[in-house]
Image (cartoon, coloured by chain):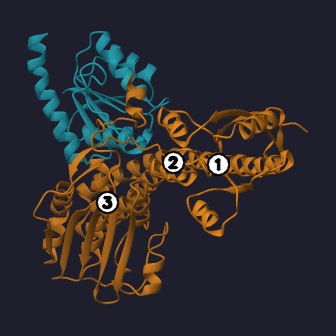
Amino acid sequence: MRGLKQTLTVATVGDEKPLRLAVRRILRKYRVDVSEVGVTAAYHPTHFTSGEQFLESVAGGADFDLLLLDLELPGISGLDVLTELDQRNRSVLTIMIISSATFETAVRATKLGAFDFLLKPFSPEELRHAVRKATDQLVMSREARRLTEEQRQVRFNFISTLAHELKAPLNAIENYLRILQMDEPPERLPMIDRSLIRLDGMRKLILELLDLTRIESGQMQRSFALVDVRTPAWAAIDLFAAGAADREIAMALRATDPVEMMADPAELEMVFNNLISNAVKYNRDGGDVTVTVSREGDIVTITVADTGIGMTPEESAKLFTEFVRIKNKDTDKILGTGLGLSTIRKLARLYGGDATVQSEKGVGSLFTVTLRDAVPREAAQGDGVPHGAANDELS
Amino acid sequence: MPKILIVDDDPDMVEAGRIVLEREGYTVESASNMVDGLRTLEENHPDLLILDVMMEEADDGLILARQIRRRGHNLPVLMLTSVNRVMGLNIDKHLEIVPVDEFVEKPVDPATLLEKVRALLAGREGRHANH
């Protein structure tokens, strides 16, 4: 059965005319059914006589689904082309055409992301076979990506609806409790206080769940600017200063020079608020919280160290998983949602970095977040970013 | 004593507001949607409006606020909502788009609510003189 037709653009890069003509003739009439996802692929071949010519076309915005790349080219080699594509983050599913299957070349090409090889001279059947394999790979992986994306959207829509439905009753309950608080006899006030604290925890859980799914689904409004990373660090330290002072916890930021990066200030705030609030929450009375920010080359590193209860390696290992809270006698009085760190890791990965922890039970924990510039420095604020829903809402 | 209209689709939000405001001596009217809200406002001429945003539709409160201004009512409006935190937006008062006098995120504790109401009602005197 024929499925939905999809035309794949195929670039052939090689300076041998018979090869280019053969590819064109064979691919024009060729169809591949990927029956698993109901797609029939057809091909639109384009030709380039050199790697330079091809790269120029890519730089000009041309997009190809499939690349048939001769290793031996008049100017730069096929491997150079692959390297360039990789560096520009424009990788294309590639079939390398080679004249002798030297082990070394094959390994290098594979490392650079080549999907398959064709040994010259090849028969039409060999070409079709390679193209069929590549098409399966391409169509299936696109379908998988689409499904994952769709799943994220469904999850986001579900959770944002749920969050609104849950927030409204919480607000109503809180209002009544606050009214009761005004004239309740003193012996009952602690119960109202606890109820309000638990209510607040529930609200935080809902909001953090929303943040998390918003980040996952790409629905986050992001606006990038050149930020001195020390600024959100100071803000977060200020925010938790009173709570820390109550327990005689000393907080310090170690960074004398500006540490600049392209980032969304609100997202950096989220990172610091989360890490510093944890560092205070899980610290011992009279302990220390030490924050550092630094930049080395492309990578901005944030560390937050505490002198708190620490964790065993087993506990550390599962810390960044959604809804995981380390439960033991040291933590049973501490409220939390188990979402903060998993959100921080997702955020860090959006920036091409990561979030990790080193910890020793009873000694303390060191959280490290690495980030890269979200956009190149010269990019204008908000450029290339999905526009905020606020504008739609109000237009 | 001044008359206050609460427009909110959550009956408990209305009720809690009513308890707090009535014990201070204010008269409280209420409506649970945009259409009833506008009608009650034009029939009863309240001195202050407390307005929710997300009712039947997510932006009903904003639309109602704009309608009220277009129809020439200049009473102070206190917008009380959780729209920003829930929708991940950053809405604030704005002369044309969100024509309200105060924009407060829910929940607001009774003392703060009363404080805002008193301040807005006090400001109303000056506003009348200008109109």
Let me know if residue B53 appears in the view.
Answer: no
Q: Are marks 1 and 2 on the same chain?
A: yes
- Residue type at mark 1 is Asp
Q: Which residue is mark 2?
A: A76
Q: Are marks 2 and 3 on the same chain?
A: yes
- Residue type at mark 2 is Ile
Q: Are marks 1 and 3 in contact (CB under 8 Å)?
A: no
Percent from the top left, x then y, of residue B59? 43, 28
Along the viewing direction, whichever of A23 and A110 lies nearer the viewer:
A23
Q: Colour of chain A?
A: orange
- Residue type at mark 3 is Val
The residue mark sitting in front, 2 or 3, is: 2
C-alpha distance separating marks 2 and 3: 44 Å
Q: Colour of chain B?
A: cyan
Percent from the top left, x then y, of residue A389? 42, 33
For residue A70, the mark is 1
Percent from the top left, x then y, of residue B3? 25, 26
For residue A271, the mark is 3
Along the viewing direction, whichever of A132 and B20 lies nearer the viewer:
A132
C-alpha distance separating marks 1 and 3: 47 Å
Q: Dot 2 lies on which element?
A: loop
